[in-house]
Image (cartoon, rainbow, N blue to C red):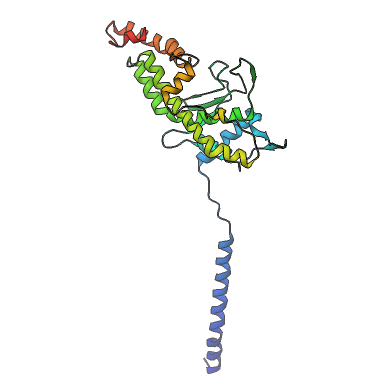
Amino acid sequence: MSKNKSLTLISSIPLLLFVFLWRNFLFLQEIETIPVQIPKSPSVYHGELQVRKMLSDRPVMGKFSRKDGKVVNISQDDKIWSWVARAYEGSERIPAIYWDSDFGLKPSQYLSDHEIPYKDSKGLIRVRPNFLDSRGVFRDASFEELWEACVYELLNIRNKNEFINIYEIAINGGLGREEWIRRNTELEHRALLKLKHFFRDVWKPWAIKNELNFRQDLWGANVSEHYLQWIKSYNGDGLDGHYGYWGNYFDKEIRPYLAKQRSYWGEGWGEPLWDGWE
């Protein structure tokens, strides 16, 4: 190779190196500008799907009227939507929850109910579109009433393990009627206290931001922090009072089951608590 050719080759090396480095720089820049798509977990899709089904079945929940009269559609950007979607997703304590458009088995004065995930049964949330209110008037539920009922059930269903424990003790003869009512209503009182906190932390700030009127009493503002004060004000002097669901359940479901077990196993089965069942 001649001296001139060698010099030409050597002098071209910096240019080739520069071109190589520049092309790699452009390539890296291109990679950095590609938007990163973080895939959602299946539970996130599940929660969103349940909210969409709920709003489809209960369209009143899908829009609200501001103080100025303007009607606004609720969306995924609303905090109430995202909170409920996450609640439907479940947690370490409770598996995913499902929306159920059925009205449930409770009488019409109950606006909502839930079924606990137990063995092979899914956890379900139900909210009626209409109900028998405290004045004895059967009417359609409002936007706020429907959302309150949904949130309450999603909070109450988190007591799943405690509800199941109480049930299993009862069907094995370990609880009398009054104790059955007390333990279950204690859990519901706990959920009502959480509802008060939800109103303070989520619903009220969201309603103020969106210029929406709200009812504090609907969200448990008058619920006492103390169970005994709450249950007395709710029921009067008796455990049943206006809160007769748990007493009726014991009479119609637990008591016949226990009687059947006693008949099968003999007179001594379940003593000494049998007197509490009578």
The answer to whether one can see residue 118 in this image is no
Question: In the displayed structure, does residue 62 sit left or right of residue 164?
Answer: right
Question: Which quarter of the figure has residue 118?
Answer: top left
Q: Nearer the viewer, residue 127 or 230?
A: 230
Q: Residue 131 at x, y = what percent?
A: 60, 19
Q: Nearer the viewer, residue 239 or 83?
A: 239
Tell me how many marks there are. Answer: 0
In this picture, is 238 found above or below 199? above
Which residue is the extreme one toward the right? Answer: 69
In this picture, is 124 found above or below 71? above
The answer to whether one can see residue 262 in this image is yes
Q: Residue 128 at x, y = what percent?
A: 59, 23
Residue at 61% of width from left, 34% of height from top? 52
Which residue is the extreme one toward the bottom? Answer: 3
Question: Which quarter of the figure has residue 70?
Answer: top right
Q: Quadrant of the C terminus?
A: top left
Q: Residue 207 at x, y = what percent?
A: 61, 38
Residue at 53% of width from left, 27% of height from top? 125
Residue at 55% of width from left, 15% of height from top? 107
Q: Residue 60 at x, y = what percent?
A: 66, 29
Question: In the displayed structure, does residue 272 sit left or right of residue 160?
Answer: left
